[in-house]
Image (spheres, rainbow, N blue to C red):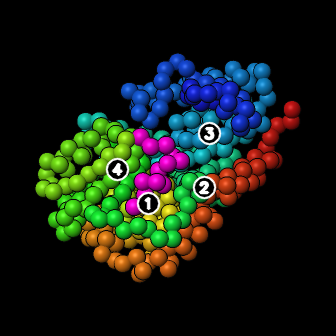
Amino acid sequence: MHVFCPKIADTRAVEKKFGIHLHQFTKWEMGRYTRLRNLKYFFYPVFLQRMVAAAARETHFDLIFSIHAIAAVAAGKLKKQLQTPAVMNFPDLLTGFMETWPGHHAPRPLVETLKRYEISLPTRYDVNGVLAVSDALADYFIQRGYPRERILPIYYGYDADWFPFRAQRPMKTPQVVVMHGSFDAHHLGEIALGAIRHVTRERPGTIFRFVGKRTEPLDSFLRRAEREIPGFKGEATGFVPYTEVAKHLLDASAGIVPYEESAGTHCAFVAKIVEYVASGLPTVATPLESIRRYFGNDPMVIFSKFDGEDFGRGIVEWLDRPAAAWESYAAKSSARVQAELDWRPLCHKAIDFTERMTAAQRRPR
């Protein structure tokens, strides 16, 4: 397997561990937190296509598999150029998240154009198959004309080894409400602020813990909460390795997913809610379509309206509810998540689907 990707550390060790050959992009820094990220994302597919095409002159490729929307642009063009089957994986509707960005950063006409282009990729290049993160995202591709039978909704996903179920949660005073993630602009907005305001007023002393890299949106949010909410108590851990995130959930009373509404968030199958439920942590979330379809009947999740006050009431409900009232079904919810959403069964499903979609169209060596 040949993997084309941005530069990573410990190249030799990674290649040896996974039995792959890495082709690393080194023209400029790539990553979630890099400067001028959006501009770099725009040009990256051009160079990625050239890298793969050059490697294809030396190595026969049986399949092109893109792992996100940016790489899908290159994959679609390479399918035609190399006459090779291609499968696109969409872990989100990337441009849909931009709907909640400030207008001066993301003018709405531009966002709508980019969103239409992203949704058109499978049909535009007639790829062999599509892995969509959720049914909500799959619906967009179907509406654009891509065949339903060539789409597999594949709900992401967590590593069960690092988020074990905790049958009994220690009761900490004051109580802790936790959120972890990448803390981009769409993660923290008026809903989160309104929820914190309500909880701080109704349950003074409650601590809000944010687990993850301290981004500008997070720092800006914390400054605003300290300025506008009397008695606000917040913690920010800074970057935490994935393998250690669960440690910061242990003493929490509730986990939260206060995402603002957009096409991107409705399509996202938010990993943090999976990890909360797997850990046995009561959760409050806004009614994002993708996670509501999956967790709608799960007793460990309260869905609020897209409203901060209502979200805050959901948090208070969990803070007030005795553990004895929910621990009996927490294990069942955790077991379901582990059986269906651990990376191992998900990867098997993805591989089986990809092989079915491309088996008849691979060209002979």
- First in sequence: mark 2 or mark 4? 2
| SS class, disc 3 | strand
Question: Quick check: 146 left or right of 326?
Answer: right
- First in sequence: mark 3 or mark 1? 3
Cα distance, mark 2 to mark 4?
A: 22 Å
Q: Give the residue at x 30% y 37%.
A: 216
Mark 2 is on which residue type?
Asp
**Percent from the top left, x then y, of residue 308?**
24, 62
Residue that carries the numbered disc 4 in the rendered image? 210
**Percent from the top left, x then y, of residue 143?**
52, 56
Residue that carries the numbered disc 1 in the rendered image? 250
Q: Is residue 20 above or below residue 193?
A: above
**Percent from the top left, x then y, of residue 258?**
33, 58
Q: Which residues are magenta?
A: 239-251
Cα distance, mark 1 to mark 2?
A: 15 Å
> Which quadrant of the structure image shows residue 73?
top right
Which of the two marks, 3 or 2, is nearer to us in this view? 2
- First in sequence: mark 1 or mark 4? 4
Q: Is residue 163 above or below residue 27?
A: below
- First in sequence: mark 1 or mark 2? 2
Q: Give the residue at x 76% y 32%.
A: 61
Mark 3 is on which residue type?
Ser
Q: Is residue 83 visible?
A: no
| SS class, disc 4 | strand
Q: Give the residue at x 44% y 68%.
A: 169
Magenta span includes 245:
yes
Which of the two marks, 1 or 4, is nearer to us in this view? 1
Residue that carries the numbered disc 2 in the rendered image? 161
Q: Give the class, few, some or many, for how many residues have Cα within 10 Å of label 3's Cα (few <14, many ≥20).
A: many
Residue that carries the numbered disc 3 in the rendered image? 66
